[in-house]
Image (cartoon, rainbow, N blue to C red):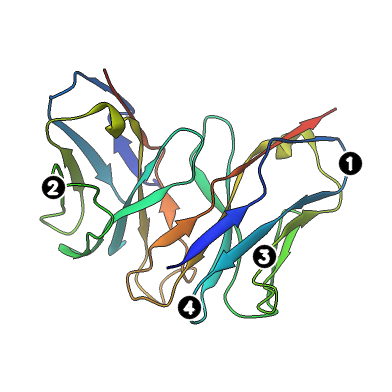
Amino acid sequence: GNSVTQMEGPVTLSEEAFLTINCTYTATGYPSLFWYVQYPGEGLQLLLKATKADDKGSNKGFEATYRKETTSFHLEKGSVQVSDSAVYFCALKGSSNTGKLIFGQGTTLQVKP
Amino acid sequence: GAGVSQSPRYKVAKRGQDVALRCDPISGHVSLFWYQQALGQGPEFLTYFQNEAQLDKSGLPSDRFFAERPEGSVSTLKIQRTQQEDSAVYLCASSPPRGEGPLDEQFFGPGTRLTVL
């Protein structure tokens, strides 16, 4: 079945450092891929998405490219800020009609000033 | 506008009690999802509604779990005879009709944290 695997955290970085959070997936067909973020005390929010191979999703300085050949959707940001501290979830939506999301286990990012 | 709301935000139940968790989706959203998020894990799909029809309940872990959305708006997730392993955050999400909003985006509520003692 479909699944998502994320790198384990926590990831601790200094402000302005480069961020990569790895995400790989297993799916049949052509899934859509997402990154969701959960800030402390808040609900899940969509950060970015890509719906087909080679698409790049971007938002708030974050980027991720849908790589079908490596079944990956790694999240990157060139210069993190303290306010980026949160839990990041990679997710996929398969080809079924229900639209249910399959999430990775989440990666906690801590950015120190 | 108002987002997805859930109530109660926190619920403590004794083992064996029944609980009911409520979700108010964004007005006009036809799709509604329930997810279960155990501590330190990602959300896991429970069930899906399109309007009042429950089209997928493959993620419900046992027959103690029951969800309904009788008028195609508010939804209730009911857990009977709660067990300790039911302790988790229960998330509700809704999404707009196709062509009326960002494709594929699900809008999540803040969740209900259930603790079973």
Q: Residues within 10 Å of mark 4 (few under 14, many from 20)?
A: few
Residue A34 in the image, given as x and y percentages of width and height = 57, 62
Q: Which residue is mark 2?
A: B63
Whether A47 is drawn above or below A37: the answer is below
Q: Looking at the rendering, in which quadrant would you find the C terminus of chain B?
A: top left
Q: Amino acid at mark 3?
A: Phe
Residue at disc 2, secondary structure? loop
Q: CA distance from mark 1 to mark 4?
A: 38 Å
Q: Amino acid at mark 2?
A: Asp
Residue at disc 3, secondary structure? loop
Chain bearing tag 4 is A
Q: Which residue is mark 4?
A: A28
Chain bearing tag 2 is B
Q: Are marks 1 and 4 on the same chain?
A: yes
**Circle on res. A108:** none
Residue B18 in the image, given as x and y percentages of width and height = 12, 30
Q: CA distance from mark 2 to mark 4?
A: 29 Å
Q: Select label 3 or label 4 by which is in front.
A: 4
Chain bearing tag 1 is A
Q: Amino acid at mark 4?
A: Thr
Whether A14 is drawn above or below A105: the answer is above
Residue A89 in the image, given as x and y percentages of width and height = 57, 50
Q: Which residue is mark 1?
A: A16
User: Is B98 displayed left or right of B19 in the figure?
Assistant: right
Residue at left offset 81%, top offset 43%: A80
Q: Are marks 2 and 1 on the same chain?
A: no
Residue at disc 1, secondary structure? loop
Residue at left offset 41%, top offset 72%: B100
User: Is B1 displayed left or right of B92 in the figure?
Assistant: right
Q: Residues within 10 Å of mark 2 (few under 14, many from 20)?
A: few
Q: Which residue is mark 3?
A: A73
